[in-house]
C-alpha cells in the first residue's frame, strides 16, 4: 500500500489582503474627495426650496412624531431622559447611519460612468459620501447641543 504522494505545483493566493485599503493612495486623491463632498453637499441644497434649513426641519418633525406616537399614545418610558432629547438623538444617529448605508451601497452603480473613464482609488467615492453625511450629522448634532443648553440653563 505504498501510494504515491502528489506535490502541488502551483498555489493560488490573493495578491492583496482583504484589509489592504491603500490609504496612502486615497490620501493622494484628497482633492477629489473634497470635490465629491462639495458636490454632494451643494446638490442637497439645490434639490429643496428650504435648502440648509431642511437639515433642521427633518429631524425636528420626526422627533415630534415620535413624541406623539411613542411618548403620548404608547406611553413608552425613556428611563429618566428628557423625551425630546431622547428621540432627537436617536433620530439624528439613525439618519446618519441610514444615509451612509444607502449612499455607499449605490455609489458604484451611480458613478459607473466615472469609473470607466478615469483611474482613481475606488474607495474615494464611498468615503466622500460618508464625509458629506458626517457634515450633515454635525449640523444636526448642533441642534442636540442647542437643546441641551436649553434644558440645563
Image (cartoon, rainbow, N blue to C red):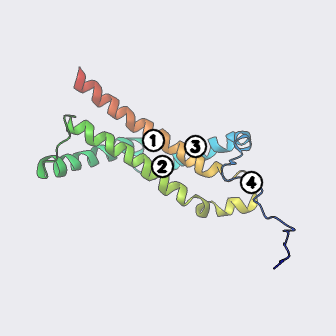
Separation of residues labelled 3 and 1 (CA atoms): 12 Å
- Relative image position of residue 26 (x, y in whole percent): 70, 43
Q: Which residue is mark 3?
A: 38
Secondary element under disc 2, as helix, strand or loop, is: helix
In the depicted structure, whether residue 152 falls above or below residue 72: above
Which of the two discs, 3 and 2, labels the residue nearer the N terminus? 3
User: Quick check: marks 3 and 2 in contact, CB under 8 Å?
Assistant: no
Does residue 147 appear left or right of residue 23 in this picture?
A: left
Q: Which residue is mark 1?
A: 136
Question: What residue sits 71% from the left and 52% below the top?
Answer: 17
- Relative image position of residue 32 (x, y in whole percent): 68, 44
Q: Which residue is mark 4?
A: 16
Does residue 127 appear left or right of residue 145 in this picture?
A: right
- Relative image position of residue 67 (x, y in whole percent): 19, 46
Q: Which residue is mark 2?
A: 44
Separation of residues labelled 1 and 4 (CA atoms): 34 Å
Amino acid at each position: 500500500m505504498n501510494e504515491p504522494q502528489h506535490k502541488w505545483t502551483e498555489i493560488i493566493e490573493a495578491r492583496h489582503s482583504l484589509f489592504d485599503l491603500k490609504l496612502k493612495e486615497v490620501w493622494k486623491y484628497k482633492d477629489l474627495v473634497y470635490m465629491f463632498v462639495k458636490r454632494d453637499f451643494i446638490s442637497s441644497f439645490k434639490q429643496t426650496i428650504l435648502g440648509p434649513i431642511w437639515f433642521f426641519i427633518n429631524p425636528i418633525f420626526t422627533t415630534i412624531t415620535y413624541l406623539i406616537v411613542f411618548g403620548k399614545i404608547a406611553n413608552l418610558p425613556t428611563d429618566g431622559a428628557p423625551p425630546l432629547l431622547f428621540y432627537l438623538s436617536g433620530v439624528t444617529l439613525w439618519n446618519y447611519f441610514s444615509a451612509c448605508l444607502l449612499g455607499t451601497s449605490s455609489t458604484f452603480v451611480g458613478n459607473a460612468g466615472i469609473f470607466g473613464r478615469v483611474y482613481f482609488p475606488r474607495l474615494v467615492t464611498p468615503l466622500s459620501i460618508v464625509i458629506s453625511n458626517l457634515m450633515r450629522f454635525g449640523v444636526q448634532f448642533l441642534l442636540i447641543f442647542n437643546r441641551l443648553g436649553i434644558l440645563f440653563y
